[in-house]
Amino acid sequence: MALRERYGTQVDFLLRRVSPEEAFGLSLTVGLILLIGCGWAFGEVLDAVIDREEVAALDSPVTSWLVAHRTPLLTVIMKVVTQLGGLWVLAPLLTIVGLVAALRYRQTDAPGFLAASSLSTAALVAAIKLLIARPRPRIGAIVATYGGYAFPSGHSAQAVAAYAALAFLIARSVGSWRRRVIVWAAAVMLAAVIGFSRLYLGAHWLTDVLGGFAIGGAWLALLVTTWTTYRHRRRARSQRSSR
């Protein structure tokens, strides 16, 4: 009780940051935590790739094990799953969801937010690929031919950024926490399966996928934090001007 009386202001501030009723404070806090956490994780993976540390040493054994345990049916399934992380699937999906959000739910900035989450992630990953210039795996039978460099995995980064952006918008529209958890769990599972498909098909090393997850999460956290702050400040200005 004495601590509560002494640090009441600070405690109330922290509680507002994580309270479901304080939507802005909660989203801002979570966004900053994810930005820092995912940014740190990407830095660690990048350092492991450049210096070939212990994590990078797992790349070849993991890829070799997956190649040795391929089956015809699972290969077909993984070829389908991996397409869900490509731009030719994500672009129309995000466009449709953005238009529905704008026209039906009056979220007029949703199309721009979804487009930014996908296109800017793709551009960021492409730039990093050119800087690192890491070759793709060449272990076992080639399932398909993949061009470009390996690190980080573009499909993995796109899956995290795009499907998490969709989950963020959808979760804002559903009523209960249970449904929000289901939406986010579905997005996480989908991104994980897409990342696994890149490993299984031999398109990327393990650290490529981990790096893709990390940079996709960090970049989306930055976009969500910026977008949420902008909406909050715009709403606050609108309320002040209407008084």
Image (cartoon, grey):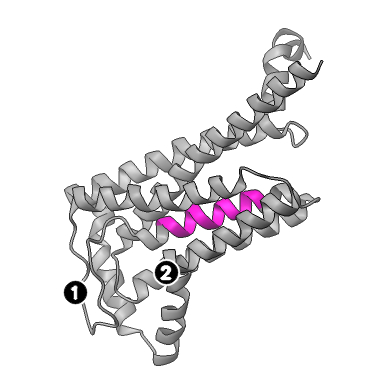
Eyeballing the image, is 157 above or below 8? below
The correct choice, above or below, for 39 with respect to 111 in the image is above
What amino acid is at disc 2? Phe
Reply yes or no: does residue 164 show up in magenta: yes
Classified by dominant secondary structure, the portion drawn in magenta counts as: helix
Question: Front-most of 53 and 139?
Answer: 139
- Residue 201 relative to residue 112: left or right: left
- Residue 161 at what x, y percent from top left? 48, 52
Q: Is residue 209 visible?
A: yes
Q: Is residue 233 found left or right of 81 in the rendered image?
A: right
| Range of residues picked out in magenta | 157-169
Residue at image point 40% right, 40% down: 39
What residue is disc 1 on? Answer: 138
Task: Give the alpha-carbon distance from disc 1 to disc 2, as whole Å.
Answer: 17 Å
Foreground pick, 58 / 87:
87
Which residue carries the number 2 mark?
196
Residue 231 quadrant: top right
Residue 73 placement (x, y as % from top left)? 44, 90
Q: Residue at x 22, y 70 (%)?
A: 137
Q: Is residue 135 left or right of residue 211?
A: left
Query: Which kind of residue does numbered mark 1 sit on?
Result: Arg
**Image point (67%, 24%), residue name:** 14
Q: Of label 1 and label 2, which has the lower sequence position? A: 1
Task: Single out the residue that lies furthest toward the top.
Answer: 6
Residue 47 quadrant = top left
